[in-house]
Structure formats: structure tokens, C-alpha cells
Amino acid sequence: MKIPGAVIGDIVGSKYEFHNHRSKEFKFIDADNFFTDDSVMTVAVAHVLTEYGESDDAELTEATVRLMCEYGRRFPHAGWGSMFSYWLNVRPVPYGSYGNGAAMRISPVGWYARSEEEVRRLSRIITCVSHNHPEGIKGAECTAMAVFDARMGKSKEEILERVSEYYPGISCLSCDELRKHYDFDVTCQGSLPPAMVCFSEGVSFEDTVRNVISIGGDSDTLAAIAGAVADVYYGIPESVMAEAVKLLPADFVTVLDRFFEKVI
């Protein structure tokens, strides 16, 4: 059994998205936590890659739209933004979004891809079905590339150096400053730098996610992004995954099992 860090981060952050905690002291997962739209789309992307990862661009695009809509429509109250909800239910065509939804769903690409070129290609195709603004494309690619670099055994310094190519100002940020001043921001450009700072200062998967919760903002999505990278870099304790499984639909676990059987 393998539950990815993006899903666990989402579950941990779920109850703090609109009730920011701004402390590292809290129960990591309990009965009040739940999965949100971040997990639903992450599982959908894992499903897409498992079944269609070797397809050409057109077939992969069609499969991404179809499966994302199928998954999303099953959970109408998962926390969708209004524009993405319209995309899911009415008109699934690109709408120029640079929202952080582009980044929160993309981590399976970093697990699946076998080269940097494949990271870029798969990330762009999966992102551009909805979030085709340059900032959305960049945020997704940065997340997927950080996951890929961690898989390739890169050091934290090397991972963050790559992140800095996408977001040069990241070295000027710290969790301490973010706790004082960071506000709710659902854009990629407002989410990727703080999420990656939380990873940079973390000393384990759990500590990284606790950093995220402590800075406030869009807690579940920031934790999905930072947790995706920390998962690969540090690993996740079996006990944490066992708690997360209790909060997920059985078919999500089956899809994730099939995905990780393919990529690990």
C-alpha cells in the first residue's frame, strides 16, 4: 500500500484551509480530517497515467479530460473553485487559469516520467486541459520536476536550485516570515514559493507538512504540493499512510496501488 504525499498533505490540511492554525502543534490526522478536490484530481491523474501514459498527445489529452470529469463529478462537494466546477460540469475546455489546482494534481507525473523531457511533456498536456496560462503551466511543471528530481536522488540543495529557476525569489523567504505575513493565495505564483520553502526547512515528511500548516493560507493545497516532494525525498511512515487510508474511498486506494505497481 502506498498513499502519495500529495493526498496525505491534502488530508492533513483539509480542516485548516479556511481555519488557519499557524502553529506546528496539532494532531496530524484524526477523524475530523477529510480528502478534498486536491486528492480527487491527484488520483484522477494517477489513473490517467496508468492507463494512457504511453499514448500520443491527442489521446492523452482526451483521456485526461474524460477521467478528470468522471472523478470530479462524483464528488460535487469536494471543494472545487467556481471556474473549475464549471469546467468539470459544463464546458471542459482550457480557460486560462493560473490557479494552484494546476500544481496540486500533477505530482504523479514526477513519479511516472523517465526523463526531464517527459516531465515537461506530460505536465504540459495534463495541465493545459484547463490551466493553460503560462503561470499555471510553470507551477505544475515546477512541482512535477521537484518530485522527479527527488526520485532521481538529487540533494535538497539541487532540488531547490531547480525550483529557483522557476521562482527566483524563493531564497528570500522563510517559514518564520511566512507565519507573520503570508495570506490566502490560490495562484500558482503565490503558492509554489511558500510550499517549497516549507519543504526546504522540513526535516521529515511530517515536519514539512507541519511547516505548511503553520504558515496559513490555502493549507490543503500547499500541503499537497510540499507533501508531494517531501514524500519522495523523505518517505512516509506506514502508520501515517494507514491513517490516511481510512479516510479514502476504496477505489482510490486500488487506483493508487495500480499506479505505484507501475512506477516503483
Image: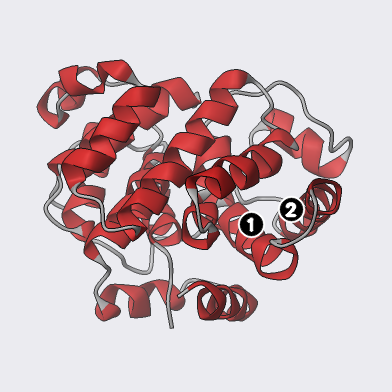
Callout 1 touching callout 2 (CB < 8 Å): yes
Residue 259 appears in which quarter of the rendering?
Answer: bottom right
Figure quadrant of the N terminus = bottom left
SS for tag 2?
Answer: helix
Does residue 253 appear to the left or right of 93 in the view shown?
Answer: left
Q: Position of residue 20 (x, y in %)?
A: 30, 36
Amino acid type assigned to the residue bearing label 1 in the image: Val
Report the residue that reaches farthest toward the right: 90
Amino acid type assigned to the residue bearing label 2 in the image: Met
Which of 123 and 227 lies nearest the eye of the viewer? 123
Mark earlier in primary sequence (1, 2): 1
Residue at figure coordinates x 65%, y 21% from the top left: 133
Dot 2, crowdedness within 10 Å: few (<14), some or many (≥20)? Answer: many
Does residue 67 appear to the left or right of 26 in the view shown?
Answer: right
How many marks the image carries: the answer is 2
In the rendered view, tell whether residue 73 sits above or below residue 218.
below
Q: Position of residue 138 (x, y in %)?
A: 52, 27
Residue at figure coordinates x 32%, y 33% from the top left: 162
Figure quadrant of the C terminus = bottom left
Q: Return the mark for residue 68.
A: 2
In the rendered view, tell whether residue 23 sits above or below residue 209.
above
Does residue 136 appear to the left or right of 190 in the view shown?
Answer: right
Dot 1, crowdedness within 10 Å: few (<14), some or many (≥20)? Answer: many
Q: Position of residue 149 (x, y in %)?
A: 35, 49
Which of 76 and 92 lies nearest the eye of the viewer? 92
Any part of residue 224 in sight: yes
Q: Return the mark for residue 45.
A: 1
Q: Position of residue 104 (x, y in %)?
A: 50, 44
Mark pair 1, 2: CA separation: 7 Å
SS for tag 1?
Answer: helix
In the rendered view, tell whether residue 125 sits above or below residue 44.
above
Residue at figure coordinates x 27%, y 69% from the top left: 236
